[in-house]
Image (cartoon, rainbow, N blue to C red):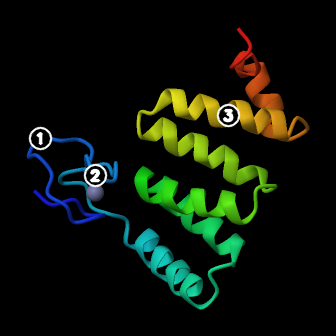
C-alpha cells in the first residue's frame, strides 16, 4: 500500500503513515470539493508563499479531511511566519491530537493559553480544565 500523501510505502493494515502521519482511510472517498479547495490554495501559495490567510485555510481544509500530517506541515510554516496568529496555534494542537501525539498537543495548548489569555478559545479550554496543563 502507498501513502496517499507522501507516497512512501505503508504496511497493509496501518491506520497511519509511519513517514508523514497521514491517516490511511481505506475505502473512504475523498471529498472532491475539499480537494478542489486544496488545489486552489496550493496554487495561490506558489504565487505568494507569505499569504498567511490562504495557508491557514489550507491547513483548516487538511484538518477537515483528517490529513493531520499535511495540516501540521502548513501550521508549522504558519507559526514561523506569523507567531502572533492565535488560531494557527489552536489548529496545531488539533493536528497533534489527530496524529495521536497528545503530549505535543498539550504543550502547544499550554503555549497557546500563555500567549493568548484573552482568546475566546482559551476561555472555552479553561471551562474544560485545560488551563492546568503544565502547572500540576
Ligand atoms: Zn505518508
Question: From the image, which quarter does the C terminus lie in?
Answer: top right
Q: Is residue 124 visible?
A: yes
Label 3 CB sits under 8 Å from any ligand 1 atom: no
Q: Position of residue 101 (x, y in %)?
A: 45, 33
Q: Secondary structure at mark 1?
A: loop
Residue at the right extreme of this rendering: 118
Residue at the front extreme of this rendering: 80
| Tag shown at residue 55 | none
Residue at the top extreme of this rendering: 136
Q: Secondary structure at mark 2?
A: loop
Q: Residues within 10 Å of mark 2 (few under 14, many from 20)?
A: some
Q: Residues within 10 Å of mark 3 (few under 14, many from 20)?
A: many
First of labels 1, 2 by sequence position: 1
Q: Position of residue 3 (x, y in %)?
A: 22, 59
| Tag shown at residue 13 | 1
First of labels 3, 1 by sequence position: 1
Q: Disc 2 and disc 3: Cα gap in Å?
A: 24 Å
| Tag shown at residue 109 | 3
Residue annotated with mark 2: 19
Quadrant of the image where one finds ligand 1: bottom left
Q: Nearer the viewer, mark 3 or mark 1?
A: 3
Q: Nearer the viewer, mark 2 or mark 3?
A: 2
Label 1 CB sits under 8 Å from any ligand 1 atom: no
Question: From the image, which quarter does the N terminus lie in?
Answer: bottom left
Label 2 CB sits under 8 Å from any ligand 1 atom: yes
Q: Disc 3 and disc 1: Cα gap in Å?
A: 31 Å
Q: Disc 1 and disc 2: Cα gap in Å?
A: 15 Å
Q: Position of residue 89 (x, y in %)?
A: 68, 47
- Left or right: residue 45 compared with residue 22: right
Q: Is residue 122 above or below residue 49?
A: above
- Left or right: residue 89 compared with residue 121: left
Amino acid at each position: 500500500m502507498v501513502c496517499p500523501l507522501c507516497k512512501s510505502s505503508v504496511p497493509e493494515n496501518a491506520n497511519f503513515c509511519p513517514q508523514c502521519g497521514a491517516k490511511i482511510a481505506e475505502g473512504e472517498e475523498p471529498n472532491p470539493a475539499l480537494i478542489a479547495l486544496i488545489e486552489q490554495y496550493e496554487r495561490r501559495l506558489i504565487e505568494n508563499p507569505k499569504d498567511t490567510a490562504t495557508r491557514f485555510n489550507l491547513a483548516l481544509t487538511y484538518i477537515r479531511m483528517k490529513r493531520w500530517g499535511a495540516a501540521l506541515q502548513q501550521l508549522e510554516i504558519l507559526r514561523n511566519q506569523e507567531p502572533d496568529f492565535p488560531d494557527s496555534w489552536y489548529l496545531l494542537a488539533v493536528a497533534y491530537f489527530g496524529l495521536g501525539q497528545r503530549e505535543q498537543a498539550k504543550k502547544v495548548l499550554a503555549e497557546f493559553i500563555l500567549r493568548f489569555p484573552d482568546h475566546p478559545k482559551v476561555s472555552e479550554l479553561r471551562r474544560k480544565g485545560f488551563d492546568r496543563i503544565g502547572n500540576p
